[in-house]
């Protein structure tokens, strides 16, 4: 790749040249943007706007095509002092743009990315530590006084593990949708996109509880880790890197890169996050296949772990009293949906049982063939008089 921005000839740039050998062989992963059409279709646009503040909406709305040459120069030269506790430390972040080296603070880097304005940052007294839960499993967050397990019990199923817990365990499908956006943007990490790590969990905590989160720090961490990752790890953040070049007034000409995609209905369908209702509406569904639409005042979220309610019997005889009312269409639909889910599970179990039985029959046939083979070998060695007799 021959480009004037990629010439690292100075002595201090030896590490940059070494990184370049790794970077040029890695493919770039496209950025995923929010799809408001999808959120409107599943009736979740209002809840999304309530969960995300203006800074997060800038992150998820970002739309810019990457330029490979800019991505290479920036990542080859990027360094982040993770030990800094001062968001305004002007030596915390260093990088090269168009052949010129720059130093800046974590806070100002957020302005370079177009996520914060100066007024917004000055209104926050201290955002340096607001980016993840502590590494110690049961230690509370120093500011918010909550542990990872306490928060997970509110939004997820099962026991939380930062390296193994999947986003499919999130109770609210909108949280899964936001987690997918995170894993293709500020916390991008390749093949582990389905895992809810500590940073993902803290971001969800900040959104749910309307608490601050240091998005600048998250991007600094993303670039620092991605710059030195293995050759098998994709490149992330190219479209944001273009934004940094533009904020410094550096020429952004180069070859065409990747354009952001959208987290649309098709992707949600592939994640088993949506269901198509008989009346033509599309709604989010939870991990148990139940419709999830808290925006609908008539919606009832059913728990399949609870026993199915007994069927109601209605008096059809003449009576002077009104008696029990006939169930509503929504109640009937929920009952049918629950019955269908149980029927589907029973069918899947029967198919699995049949498959196991076929495997067992195959093994029995193999044993019978082995026994017959041994009998033939024994007959050929012992002769007619010594042939083993059937019992």
Image (tube, helix red, strand yellow):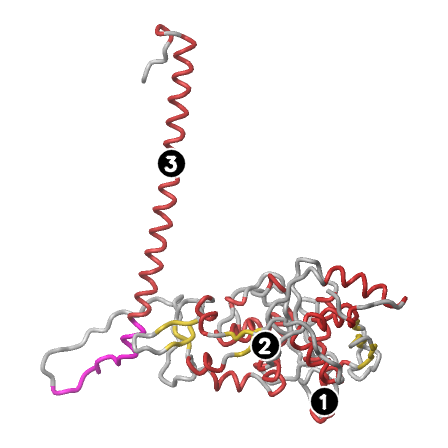
- The range drawn in magenta is 320-335
Q: Nearer the N terminus, badge 2 or badge 3?
A: 2
Q: Which residue is mark 1?
A: 121
Q: Is residue 18 magenta?
A: no
**Residue 263, position in %: x, y?**
51, 74
Q: How many numbered badges does the structure rendering display? A: 3
Within-10-Å neighbours for mark 2: few <14, some 14–19, many 20+: many
Q: Nearer the N terminus, badge 1 or badge 2?
A: 1
Within-10-Å neighbours for mark 3: few <14, some 14–19, many 20+: few
Labelled pair 2, 3 in contact (Cβ < 8 Å): no
Compare residues 40 and 176 and report the one nearer the observer: 40
Within-10-Å neighbours for mark 1: few <14, some 14–19, many 20+: some
Height in image: 242 above or below 348? below
Q: Which residue is mark 3?
A: 362
User: Is 172 positioned to the left or the right of 181 in the image?
Assistant: left
**Residue 163, position in %: x, y?**
62, 62
């Amino acid at each position: 790749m021959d480009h004037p921005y990629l010439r690292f000839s100075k002595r201090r740039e030896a590490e940059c040249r070494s990184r370049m050998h790794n970077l040029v062989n890695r493919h770039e992963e496209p950025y995923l943007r929010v799809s408001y059409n999808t959120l409107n279709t599943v009736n979740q646009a209002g809840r999304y706007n309530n969960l995300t503040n203006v800074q997060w909406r800038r992150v998820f709305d970002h739309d810019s095509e990457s330029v490979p040459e800019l991505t290479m120069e920036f990542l080859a030269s990027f360094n982040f002092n993770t030990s800094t506790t001062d968001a305004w430390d002007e030596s915390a972040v260093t990088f090269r743009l168009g052949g010129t080296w720059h130093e800046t603070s974590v806070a100002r880097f957020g302005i370079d990315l177009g996520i914060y304005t100066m007024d917004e940052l000055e209104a926050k007294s201290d955002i340096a530590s607001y980016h993840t839960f502590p590494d110690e499993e049961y230690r509370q967050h120093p500011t918010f006084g909550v542990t990872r397990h306490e928060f997970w019990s509110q939004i997820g199923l099962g026991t939380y593990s930062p390296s193994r817990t999947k986003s499919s365990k999130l109770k609210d499908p909108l949280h899964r949708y936001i987690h997918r956006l995170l894993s293709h943007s500020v916390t991008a990490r390749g093949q582990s996109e389905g895992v809810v790590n500590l940073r993902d969990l803290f971001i969800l905590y900040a959104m749910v509880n309307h608490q601050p989160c240091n998005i600048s720090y998250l991007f600094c961490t993303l670039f620092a880790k991605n710059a030195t990752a293995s050759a098998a790890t994709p490149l992330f953040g190219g479209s944001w890197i273009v934004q940094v070049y533009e904020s410094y007034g550096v020429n952004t000409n180069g070859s065409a890169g990747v354009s952001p995609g959208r987290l649309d209905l098709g992707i949600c369908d592939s994640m088993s996050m949506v269901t198509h209702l008989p009346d033509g509406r599309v709604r989010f569904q939870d991990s148990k296949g139940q419709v999830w639409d808290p925006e609908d005042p008539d919606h009832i979220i059913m728990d399949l772990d609870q026993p199915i309610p007994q069927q109601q019997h209605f008096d059809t005889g003449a009576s002077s009293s009104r008696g029990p009312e006939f169930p509503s269409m929504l109640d009937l639909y929920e009952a049918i949906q629950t019955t269908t889910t149980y029927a589907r599970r029973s069918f899947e179990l029967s198919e699995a049982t049949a498959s196991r039985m076929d495997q067992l029959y195959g093994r029995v046939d193999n044993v019978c063939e082995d026994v017959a083979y041994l009998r033939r070998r024994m007959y050929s060695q012992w002769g007619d008089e010594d042939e083993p007799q059937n019992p």
